[in-house]
Amino acid sequence: MKAHLITYGCQMNEYDTHLVQSQLVSFGAQIVDSVDEADFVLINTCAVRGKPVDKVRSVLGTLRKLKAERPLVIGMMGCLAQLEEGQQIARKFEVDVLLGPGSLLDIGKALESNERFWGLQFKDELHDHIPPPPVGKLQAHLTIMRGCDHHCTYCIVPTTRGPQVSRHPDQILRELDMQLAAGVQEVTLLGQNVNAYGVDGGAKLAGYPSFADLLRLVGRSGIQRIKFTTSHPMNFTEDVAAAMAETPAVCEFVHLPVQSGSNRVLRRMAREYTREEYLHHIANIRKHIPNAVLATDIIVGFPGETEADFEETLSLYDEVGYDSAYMFAYSARPGTPSYKHFEDLPREVKVERLTRLIAKQKDWSARKNAAHVGSIQEVLLRGDAFSEGFLEGHTRGNHPTVVPKVLGITGAGVHRVRINQATPHMMYGNLIDANGENLPEVPRFAPEAAALVSPLQMA
């Protein structure tokens, strides 16, 4: 069998794709790079917003046409598969294999059945499964928990991924050891709410550390860089910030979704914290990590949001001064309380507010990135950039960074970079040696060509 996998959505979906792909390989399947080569196409879906769902519909429509022309097995997995909305889509587009996020280990059984197979149960064995480490990758994801015990009114995740289940720390450390042995240098700990690790259903699990202590444990493993996502402000403790400061391997990057700066909107979202409590967390982070890089998520145009509410979001953005943000216009998702009980705002209102927020984000990101010009950053370079003759990677603070290639360095690994230029979403620099001198660059043009230019100038 030749299999091709398509992934939409979050880092958890990327991790799940790797998990299923490793299962397919263990069954003897060959993973191919395109739909045209495949006889099994599996789409890992997202249901958090409407746009990824529309993409899935479009891809499934194309696959259904291909299926009429040649033998092709179509599969759909992930959050959308768990919903009635997704199951209706699966019937319409003749999906053969449907797997919810809790039944991923049924992939072998599904393919052996030789008939339509739907697996939508939340199975405990998934929490004990340790996938093999990624091959030839410097970065890896590591799931520490699945599901969520919060019930934000806009969010479908508790329905699609079930209640929170924390993985045992021994399994986490065992998987991390395997990733280290495979050459991984940066690991991102994943969960719907990592701050609540070890407290499932409101009860502390015996033998499980707090999330702060888990960071300390992982930090003693030998891994070079540790990141984590996503945090819920309701469960964020000062001890997490203290653990980050005490553990050199933990990067000074915190993604702490706020969603809105208005207490009235936060109550309607059922976020379980206030603006003031959120800002107290930010103050604690900066107390322990003065150079913390802060990112957030913001939903614009939530039902009932007034202009005054939105202005409070803008003022909170200024008060925090985020380095970056993921910003979305509210998308009503069937099955959520806000879909059932709240009236959506007009699209033009949501788009206008999102445009204003994006402008503010660009202004702050430009200022924050410009402040790094002249500094020396530790950059994990992954390989070739889009522009020929350059390498791309990211800093400990998650800033995308581009550098010219230098003689004797292929690009894979952590390197010292002096930042020379910055835009709101990118930094540019040069690789330097231990003395701070620029390393000799690989010539990018013939001698008779014009002077070398940076990718910033080329843009």
Image (cartoon, rainbow, N blue to C red):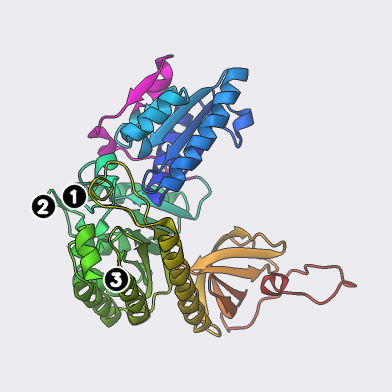
Q: Residues within 10 Å of mark 2 (few under 14, many from 20)?
A: few
Q: Residue at x 57, y 31 (%)?
A: 62
Q: Quadrant of the N terminus?
A: top right
Extreme residue toward the top, this view: 114
Task: Give the percent coordinates (x, y) of residue 311.
Answer: 34, 75
Residue behind mark 1: 149
Task: Give the percent coordinates (x, y) of residue 149.
Answer: 18, 49
Q: Secondary structure at mark 1?
A: loop
**Left or right for 2, reference 100:** right
* Of marks 3 and 1, the one in the foreground: 3
Q: Residue at x 17, y 57 (%)?
A: 209
Check residue 202 in the rendering and tell me which mark sits there, or answer none. 2
Q: CA distance from mark 2 to mark 3?
A: 31 Å
Q: Residues within 10 Å of mark 1 (few under 14, many from 20)?
A: some
Q: Secondary structure at mark 2?
A: loop
Which of the two residues, 396 or 158, is positioned nearer the viewer here? Answer: 158
- The amino acid sitting under disc 2 is Gly
Q: CA distance from mark 3 to mark 1?
A: 27 Å
Residue behind mark 3: 309
What span is colored magenta in the figure? 106-134
Q: Is residue 227 visible?
A: yes
Task: Give the percent coordinates (x, y) of residue 180.
Answer: 41, 53
Which of the two residues, 322 or 165, is positioned nearer the viewer here? Answer: 322
Q: Is residue 220 visible?
A: no
Q: Which of marks 1 and 3 precedes in the sequence? A: 1
Q: Contact (CB < 8 A) between labels 1 and 2?
A: yes
Q: CA distance from mark 1 to mark 2?
A: 8 Å
Q: Which of marks 3 and 2 precedes in the sequence? A: 2
Q: Secondary structure at mark 3?
A: helix
Q: Which of marks 2 and 1 precedes in the sequence? A: 1
Residue 291 position (above or below residue 26): below
